[in-house]
Amino acid sequence: MSWSRQDPEPDPWRVDTVDIAVAERVEWDRHAHEDMHELLWGTRGTLTVETDDGWFAVPSALGIWIPAGVMHRVVAAPRTTFRCTYFDPALGSPGDKTTAVAMPELNQALLTRLADESRLPVNARRHAEQLVTWLLQPVMLTTVDLPLPSDDRTRRVAEMLLDDPADARSLDEWGREVGASARNLSRLFVAETGLSFAEWRTRARIRRAIEWLAADHSVVSVSARVGYATPSAFVQAFRREIGHTPGEFAGARSGIGQRLS
C-alpha cells in the first residue's frame, strides 16, 4: 500500500487528498474520522465501503461520501487504486449519511489541482475548496437488502457464498459441510434473514455482481463469476432484484450509485 501524503495538512489546507494503491487485498477495519469528512473516488479496481447506512461498491465514475464520525469499513481488492480526500467539516457536507456523489470532470479536476498545487494563494485555495464541496451532489441509490444470519452454521455458509458466489452446492451438501441438516439450515435462513436460502443466495450473487460491474468487468464475465450458466439467466435475475439490467447499470453508473445493505 502506498500513500502520497501520510496525514492531512494543517490549516490552510481544508481539503487534502491521499493516493492509495494496493497490490494485494487490504481491509481497513471499522473506524471513524471524528474531525473530517471523507470522499473515496477515482477508483480503478474493486473498492467497497460498509457503514450502518449500507454496503457500497465504488464505481469509477462516482465517489462515496462518508461524513465525519461515521463508522466505516473499507475493502480494496488486489491491484486497486483510488483517491481519498479529507474535508474540513466547516466547508459543509452533501449529506449527513454515507452516500454516493457524482464525480464529473470538473470535480475531479478541482480536487486534482488542490492535491497537486501547494503554492496557491491562501484566498484562492479557500475559494476552490469551498467550490468543490458545493459541487458534490448526491445521486439516487438503489437498495438491495442482504441481512447476514447469526447462527454459526448459517453464517459460515453465507460467508463462503460471498467469497465464491458461483458455488452451486445444495442445502444437503452445505449441511454436510457445516454439520446441520438441510431442513435445519433452511429454517435458520428464513428465521434469521427473512429470506429462503435460494433467495439469499440470489441476492448474494447480485451483491458481488454489482461490485464487479462497478469495477468495469463485462456483463458476460460477471455472469459466469457469480454462478449463472448463461448471461441471459443473470440478466433476468439482476432485473428482478435491481429493476434494470446489468447493462443499464453499467451504462448509467455515472449518475446512479448502487447500495446494498
Image (cartoon, rainbow, N blue to C red):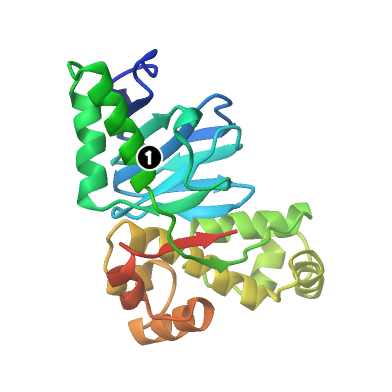
Assign a secondary structure to mark 1.
helix
Given residues 122 and 216, the one toward you in this image is 122
Task: Please report the residue visible at 39 percent of the width from the left and 65 percent of the height from the top.
Answer: 256
**Is 153 or 88 nearer to us in this picture?**
88
Image quadrant containing the C terminus: bottom right
Question: Is 105 rendered above or below residue 91?
Answer: below
Is there any visible trace of residue 26 in the rendered image?
Answer: no
Task: Report how many numbered discs are placed on residues in the image.
Answer: 1
Of residues 173 and 34, the one drawn nearer to the viewer in this rendering: 34
Percent position (x, y) of residue 34?
A: 58, 26
- Which percent across, then down, holds residue 67? 53, 39
Residue depicted at x 61% and y 51%? 53
Q: From this viewpoint, is residue 86 visible?
A: yes
Q: Is residue 156 above or below residue 235?
A: above
Question: Compared to 253, does 134 lie above or below?
Answer: above
Q: Residues within 10 Å of mark 1 (few under 14, many from 20)?
A: some
Q: Left of 235 or right of it: where is 219?
A: left
Q: Residue furthest top?
A: 10
**What residue is drawn where x is 41% and y is 58%?**
211
In the picture, measured across the screen, residue 29 lies left or right of residue 246, that is right
> Looking at the rendering, which quadrant does residue 3 occupy?
top left
- Residue that badge 1 annotates: 133
Q: Is residue 149 left or right of residue 237?
A: right
Counting from the top left corner in percent of width and height, residue 155 is at 70, 55
**Point 63% across, 71% down: residue:** 200
Q: Quadrant of residue 59?
A: bottom left
The image quarter in which residue 169 lies: bottom right
Q: Closest to the observer: 18 or 95?
A: 95
Q: Amino acid at mark 1?
A: Thr
Image coordinates of residue 79 in percent, x first then y, are 28, 41
Image quarter of the N terminus: top left
